[in-house]
Image (cartoon, helix red, strand yellow):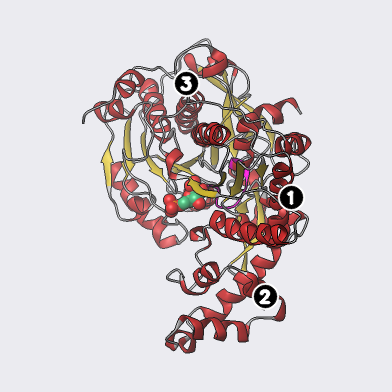
Amino acid sequence: IEKSPLQISRSLYHPKMPKALGGPVVLKEGKATESVADQAAIKELFPNTYGMPLITFEPATEKVAAPAVNVGVILSGGQAPGGHNVISGIFDGIKALNPESKLYGFLGGPSGLVDHKYVELTADIIDEYRNTGGFDIIGSGRTKLEETEQFDKGAEICKELGINAIVIIGGDDSNTNACVLAEYYAQKKTGIQVIGCPKTIDGDLKNEMIETSFGFDTACKVYSELIGNIQRDANSAKKYYHFIRLMGRSASHIALECALQSQPNVCIVSEEVEAKNLTLSDVVEQIVKVIVDRASQGLNFGTILIPEGLIEFIPAMKKLIAELNDLLAHNDDFNALETEDEKRQYVKGLLSPESREVYRDLPKGIARQLTLDRDPHGNVQVSLIETEKLLIEMVAKRLAKLKAAGSYKGKFSAINHFFGYEGRCAIPSNFDANYTYSLGYTAALLISAGKTGYMSSVRNLTAPAEEWIAGGVPITMMMNMERRHGAMKPVIQKALVLLDGAPFKYFASKRETWATTTSFVYPGPIQYYGPAEVCEQPTRTLQLEHNA
Ligand code: FBP
C-alpha cells in the first residue's frame, strides 16, 4: 500500500505509556466495588463477576516469568481513532510477557467470534497499522453478542485456537455484553477471560473510573478544526450562517467539546433541551434571537452547532416518534396507501392531538422522512433526519415573519454541514495514540493476571502520559438496571452531558458573549510534532472536569 509521508513518519512513533508499564509490574487490589445502582439485582445476575476490587499496576523490582497466552480481539461498533493502537498495545503487552503468546483478530466485529472468522495478527501485520486511524486491520460490526448460542459458538473457536481471553473494544452496549459474556464463561468454567476497552467518539462511555472513551479527543479536534475554518470563512465573507450538525447519536459531548474549542455563536445541548422540556419551536426561537441580535449590530453571519441526537431529546418529538413507531410498524393499511398525501392524512388521523400538532408544524420534507423512511423493523430512522436542514427551514420561516412585522432587518443565508465520518478514522492525536496503546497494554496485563469481567482503565489523563495510572475496573461497577425492549436489563449507564458539570457550566457562562460578539477561536489541524502545548493537550472537557 502506498503511504503518505505523515503515515510513514507516524509508523515510527513510540506511544507514551504510564511509567509503571515500562518494566515489570505488580498488581495492587483496591477495595471491593458495588454497582452504581440496583446492587441486589446486579449481584444476583453476576454472581461470579460482581463486587471484584479495583486494580492498579505498579512498578515491581523483579520480572516474574509468565506463561504464554492466546488472546482474541474484537472491534465493535463505530470506528474511533486509536483502535489499531489498542490492538498493537495488546500485541506488545502479551509478547513482552511471553514471546510465545499469540493474538487473533476476529473479523468484521463480534460476528467474527460467532462465525469463526479470524486471522492471526503477526508482527508484520501489526507494524503496518501502528498509530493509524480506522478499524480496517480486522474490520468492525454492530452484531450484538447477547444469546447463549452465540457465546457457545465463541467458546468453541476459543477452544480450537487455545484462546484464553477475549478483548472487546467497544462502547457502552458492547462492554455490557462483554460483561455478560465474562459471567457466562465463568459460570460455565470455560477458562476464557473477557476484558473490555472503552471506545467511542461520542464520549458517552465514562464514569468515575473511566475518564474518557478513546477516539473522542481526535474526532473533536478534527471537527473543531473544520468548524474553525468555516468560522474564519464566515468572518471573512460575512454573509452566511453555517448550521453544523455533529455526530453523537445520543449525548451532546462532541457538540459541547467543539463549542469549547471553537466558540461558535450558538451550540444546542440536547440534555438541556430535555431538562427544560423545550419544544422544537423553543429551540428555533433561541437561534432566531441570536440572529436578530447580531443583525441589529450589522452581523449577518455565524455558526450554529447542533448535536445529532437533538430530535430524540425534545420531549414532544420523542412522543411523536414513539407514536409513529407504534402506529406504522407493520401496518398493512398504511402500506397499501398510494400517495404521500394519503399517507400524511392517515397518520394525522391516528396521532394524539398533541403529536398531531407537532407533526403538522414540521416542514413537509421532515414529516415525510419521519413517516416514510423506516428501518427494517418499521422504526423511524432518527439518525438519518437532517436536523440542521430542519432548523434552517424553520428559522428562515420565523425570520421572514419577523421581517414582515418590521422587527428584523437582516439578511439570512444559511449553509448546512454534517460532521461525523470526517473524524472517526483520523490519524489518532498523540493523546489518543498514547491512551489507546496504554489501554491495550493494560488489557494484556489484566489477562496475564487471570482477570475477567474487567475494563482496562488508564486514569489521571490530564497529567503527562508518564504519570497516568493503569489498572482495571470491574464492569459490573458501572451497571444499573434499565428497561430495554420492555424488560429490565443490566446495562452500563450511558454518560450524558451533566448540566451541573464543569464543561457545561463553563459553556453556559460564556455563551451569551459568544452569541452576540464574534469570539471565534480557530483551533487549526491536529499537530503530531512540536511543542507540548499544541501537541499534547487533552480535550477541554477533560481539563474542565479535572479542575472542577
Ligand atoms: P459507537 O457508539 O458504536 O462508537 O458509534 C458512534 C457513532 O459514530 C455515532 O456518533 C453515530 O450516530 C453512529 O456511530 C453512526 O453509525 P454508522 O457507522 O452505523 O453509520
Q: Is mark 2 within 8 Å of ligand 1?
A: no
Nearest the viewer among 426 and 343 is 343
Which region of the structure is painted magenta?
245-254
In the rendered image, residue 489, in percent from the top left (x then y), is placed at 61, 61
Examine the residues drawn in magenta and state their main secondary structure: loop
421 shown above or below 81: below
Q: Which residue is mark 3?
A: 527
The residue drawn where x is 75% and y is 61% is 405
Nearest the viewer among 438 and 283 is 283
**Magenta-span inclusion, residue 217:** no
Quarter placement of the N terminus: top left
In the image, taking residue 472 as reference, residue 513 lies left or right, namely right
Q: Amino acid at mark 3?
A: Gln
In the rendered image, residue 166, in percent from the top left (x then y), is placed at 41, 42
Q: Which residue is mark 1?
A: 289
Can I make out residue 156 in this image? yes
- Toward the left, the furthest residue is 1
Quarter where residue 389 is shown: bottom right
